Amino acid sequence: MIRRLRPNVATASVTSPNMTFPLFPNNPNDNNVISPPNRRYLSSKPTVDIAKTMPVSMSEMNNETLVTIAALGNHEARCEALVRHIMSVDGVDYDAGKTKFDEIAKANRTAISSLAVYPYFVGIGVGMIAAFGSLPLVFELNTAKWFNEVLVTTDVPEPKDLETVLEVGSWTWNWMEPPLGALSFSLLCLQYARAQLTNLGLHPYTSLVISRRADALAAAYPQYDPTMIRQFSESDPLA
């Protein structure tokens, strides 16, 4: 509807500063009007004055906008909202509030034991090794022969049947297919089970760790609003 108004705004001439224009000209019952000073905001291009008022960082946002963005899960907005909350509670300026916030952020990283994040690093390592290690185990002849001698001990085909990587893969797939297929199916079942846990409102491991860290941080700083402390902690990375 605003797009329909733009041609009229661009072509209409204002003969008096007190003239008013209907907001919806096609509606005879519309009593809303737009005064000429406000009509410039309906133009297709912003003015320099409008551009200068645009905030470029979270610290320039007003409180209402900042709280709205923070409620959407934006971590930077939650950090800025917590800084302002610290300023309000402690009665300090922005720099002092930022210093206190840095202390809380550091405490948040140590609120849980480092052992809690070790399973993630183990999973990353195993996944990377499996992803890149499976390729030579299937297609590289020397690696396949070594693996066969150590763990499989199956008959090696004639050299003429191992001349290309696809022929090597055809041979190694005889023992690689069962573990790869079983692991893939196991991961699929685990993903399905996790989805059902989420549907029931139960917390998988990650949610449990994040929730406990948020509880610990809120307990360490009881003078501040626990909801704001928890929201900051929940959106802060684990590592």
Image (cartoon, rainbow, N blue to C red):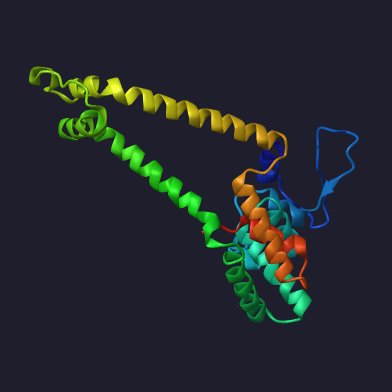
Residue 46 location, x and y as percent? 61, 54
Foreground of the two, 12 or 227:
227
Residue 169 location, x and y as percent? 23, 23
Q: Is residue 52 above or below residue 156?
A: below
Judge whether residue 176 can be spotted in this image.
yes
Foreground of the two, 105 or 197:
197
Residue 239 location, x and y as percent? 51, 59
Residue in view at x 72 percent, y 55 percent: 68
Residue in view at x 65 percent, y 48 percent: 43
Q: Is residue 67 above or below residue 154?
A: below
Foreground of the two, 198 or 50:
198
Residue 119 location, x and y as percent? 50, 50
Judge whether residue 81 can be spotted in this image.
no
- Of all residues shown, which one is farthest toward the left? 160
Residue 161 lies left or right of residue 54; in this view the side is: left
- Residue 228, quarter of picture: bottom right
Foreground of the two, 110 or 96:
110
Residue in view at x 60 percent, y 46 percent: 205
- Residue 196, quarter of picture: top right
- Residue 17, quarter of picture: bottom right
Q: Is residue 40 above or below residue 158?
A: below
